[in-house]
Every structure is written in structure tokens, then in C-alpha cells.
Amino acid sequence: MPVISPDPSSDGNSEEREHRRIVVPAGEHRKRIDVYLTRRIENATRSKVQQAIEAGMVLVNGKAVKSSYQLNPDDTIDITFPRPPRPDALAENIPLDIVYEDEALLVVNKPAGMVTHPAYSHYSGTLVNALLFHCNHLSKINTELRPGIVHRLDKDTTGLMVIAKTDAVHAFLAKQFSKRTIDREYWAIVWGRFKSRKGTIEASLGRSKRDRKKVAVTEDGKSAITEYEVLEEFDFLSLLRLHLKTGRTHQIRVHLAHIGHPVFGDPTYNGRSNIWNGLEGKKSQKAANLLKLISRQALHAKTIGFIHPSTKEFIKFDSELPEDMKAVLSNF
């Protein structure tokens, strides 16, 4: 089985450090900093948070504090902690939903819950681990931990991705992504009904100053444009078709939340409240029941089309909506 080793140019014994900044929201109730950080930081335990605080790796408003410190709204928390050494990317026998494959590339339908490539918080179970088991060769342009990966989907976004088997194919496809000639269509279930059947969202995006793990609309961010079309409307939800004119992280999710129509079920960008926009009574209860059917954002990369690097002909692939999104729609 293929193994992807760490970059030989990096010192495998050196300790890398990660910095994270969190600004306590204005409406947050006072609570101990160790309790707050245990809740906010993925995979953190209270004991490890307390150890980091005692080691002086956690500062509040630039000063060291104790674990018992009571946070105030607008406090700025700076955290510095060591990252573990980068692991090898190992082949794993994980089933793949392969829509198309030839000697140059694959098109796969990524399920919800699968991270695209290994990272410090996800060493295994990723799409790359599955691809390494399935393929003898993958492109190596995009670092050793991202073989074959030309573009990404969020962990809980489902849908079609194209994978490159050689560096030449990778470069050919990457050029199409760069020029925005790749034809990608997303479908999403979102909160609310729209005044216009079609629209364009233009709002610059950058890392949130309050939570670096999130993306936000910011004046100094990168330009981002999303086009949408309403396919069907329901009582308090809509089914949208979307096209990206740019390809920013979390673009669809943040843009839709920005205009007051967050993606249904999105735990990060305000998509999981059954009292959205003042829903009451039976509607609120129905929304709560629908949220039980889907634990993620109702967003699916439904189609992808591109010029094939070998034949130079345009090819396009389509996929069905995943079962959780179908379940939500079937209840109307």
C-alpha cells in the first residue's frame, strides 16, 4: 500500500506551534476560562486546557490568567499550543462512491463526515486515505498530505469532486479552477423564502476576528460572489441552486447566512435554530423535527463539469441529493 511521507525539507523533530485567537461574544454569560475553552476547542479536555493555562500558553487581553478566571464579554483570548509531529498519510480500505474513473482522473461523490485530506486534527478516515488504497498513482503537486486533491469540500458538505492521478492532469484541472471555467452546481436547503427567484450575493470574506475557525463578511476580505436560483419554496424553507463565481472557504454558507437565509442544519453559521426568524407553535415544532433528520449543513455539490485533460472534450457529471436532504424535503 502506498505511504506518503512527511516533507523531507522540514525537520520532523521540530515542535510546530499553532496560535489561535478567540474574542468572547458580547452576549456571552460569565464563565470560567477553562470551561469556556474546553467547549470551544475541538477535542480539548479540561485537564489539558488547565495545563496550557498553567504553562502560560493562554493569555487574556495580553496577560496570563488562572483557570478560575471569569471571562467577560469582548475579552480577547490568545492561545499558543504545540502541534504533534505531522503523520504519514496511510492507505485505508474505506469505501469510495466512484462516479467515473479513467487513467487520468476520478470523480468521486464525497459523503458527509469525511474530511478531504489529513490534517493535525484528522489523521485518518479522510478521502485521501481512501484514495491511496484505491489508486496506485495520484498527483503530488499539492503537498504530500494532499495527493490528487485539486479542490476541497467541507467535511460535512457532500458531493462531487474530481481527483487527479498525475501531476500533468492536476495542473490542467487546476488551471480550469483558477480561470473559473469549471462548471460546478450546488444545491442547498436554506431557511426562509425569497422575494426574487434569482439573485447574486457579493460580499468579501475573511477569517472572523472573533473566532479564527470561522469565516465572516469583512471589508478587508477577499472578493466573493455567489449566484443563486430558487428551485422550490416550502413553508419556511427553500431549495436553492447555486453557482460560485469565486471559490472562498465556506463561501456559500457564510454568504447565505449573511443575507438572512442560513443553510438549514448548519451548526457553525446559525442554521440549527428551530425558532429561526420568529417561528412559533406548530412551525417551530416542525422545524425542530426536521433538524433531527440532518446533523449537518444541507449543502450538496450536485454537478461538476470540465474539459478532460486527455480528450480535450467537455464532460459533466451529476449526482442525486443525499438521503438526509431528501428526508427533509419529503416532509413537505
Image (spheres, helix red, strand yellow):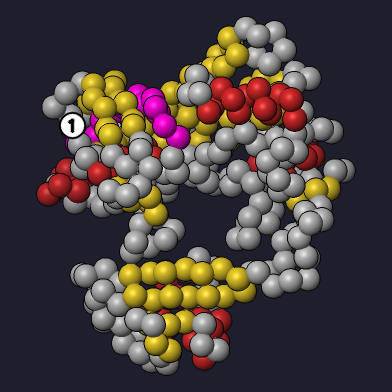
Q: Quadrant of residue 128?
A: top right
Query: Residue at horizontal 71%, vertical 45%?
Result: 143
Query: For mark 1, what is the residue?
Result: 193
Image height of 46 relative to 166, above or below: below
| Quadrant of image for the C terminus | top left
Q: Which stretch is magenta?
A: 235-247
Q: Amino acid at mark 1?
A: Arg
Q: Position of residue 116 (x, y in %)?
A: 60, 43
Give the left or right position of residue 212, taking residue 264 as reference.
right
| Mark 1 crowd level (few <14, some 14–19, many ≥20, 10 Å Cα) | some
Q: Is residue 241 magenta?
A: yes
Q: Which one is in front, 24 or 100?
A: 24
Q: Which one is in front, 57 or 48?
A: 57
Q: Position of residue 244 (x, y in %)?
A: 40, 28
Q: Mainly helix, strand or loop, the magenta region? A: strand
Instruction: Examine the rendering and report whether any part of residue 60 can be seen.
Output: yes
Q: Which one is in front, 267 or 161?
A: 161
Q: Position of residue 192 (x, y in %)?
A: 20, 36
Query: Residue at horizontal 53%, vertical 75%?
Result: 80
Image height of 24 relative to 129, above or below: below
Image height of 16 relative to 244, above or below: below
- Secondary element at tag 1: loop
